[in-house]
Image (cartoon, rainbow, N blue to C red):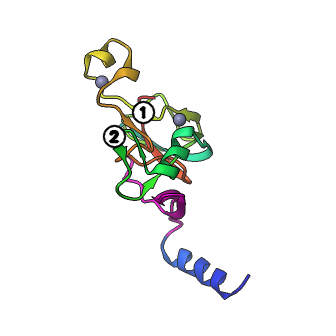
């Protein structure tokens, strides 16, 4: 390992008390992915932070990679791809009672609103206000860590 490696290590150590930088695969242009830092928001009351162990590459990820869009969803700014994922919980919000640090979980990539008639009728997959991993403007989960609402 050359000097560059040592320098990076030192920089990481200097960056702070064991705080590891979360890295992710960003789609930046057609057929161009870059591994860059991905800062997650602080874990909310009903959220969890998950250490990713496996992330699938979906047909939609490939489609975004090639075209930078799917139908009316257009990637206008760099976006983290990936949404079919599983991992281990590392942090839970204070309102999360059914999950604990260390639990192994698979993540439902969509977060529905829980207020509309579809959600209340138990068919959340039809929610018109769905926020979906790796669908603009929501970032995906091809990263070391991802955060997620605990509802799923
Ligand atoms: Zn998919
Ligand atoms: Zn809904």
Residue named by callout 1: 110
Instruction: Give percent across and percent down for residue 60.
Output: 51, 40
Q: Earlier in the sequence, mark 2 or mark 1?
A: 2
Q: Which mark is residue 72?
A: 2
Residue 84, above or below 51: above
Residue at 51% in and 47% down: 141
Indicate the position of residue 30 as horizontal and vertical percent values. Answer: 49, 58
The residue sitting at the bottom extreme is 3
Residue 113: horizontal and vertical position, in percent? 30, 28
Residue drawn at x 56%, y 39% is 59
The kind of secondary structure element at disc 2 is loop
Q: Nearer the viewer, mark 2 or mark 1?
A: 2
Corner quadrant of residue 28 = bottom left
Q: Quadrant of residue 135?
A: top left
Q: Residue furthest top?
A: 121
Q: Which residues are magenta?
A: 17-45
Q: Is residue 32 magenta?
A: yes
Other residues around mark 1 within 10 Å, as few (<14) / some (14–19) / many (≥20): many
């Amino acid at each position: 390992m050359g000097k560059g490696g040592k320098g990076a290590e030192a920089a990481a150590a200097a960056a702070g008390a064991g705080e590891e930088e979360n890295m992710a695969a960003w789609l930046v242009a057609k057929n161009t992915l870059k591994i860059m830092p991905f800062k997650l928001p602080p874990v909310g009351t009903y959220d969890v932070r998950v250490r990713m162990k496996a992330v699938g590459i979906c047909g939609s990820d490939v489609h975004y990679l090639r075209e930078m869009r799917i139908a009316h969803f257009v990637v206008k700014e760099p976006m983290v791809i990936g949404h079919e994922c599983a991992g281990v919980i590392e942090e839970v919000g204070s309102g999360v009672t059914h999950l604990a640090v260390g639990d192994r979980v698979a993540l439902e990539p969509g977060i529905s609103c829980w207020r509309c008639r579809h959600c209340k009728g138990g068919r959340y997959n039809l929610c018109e206000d769905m926020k979906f991993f790796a669908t603009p403007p929501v970032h995906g989960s091809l990263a070391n860590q991802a955060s997620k609402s605990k509802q799923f």
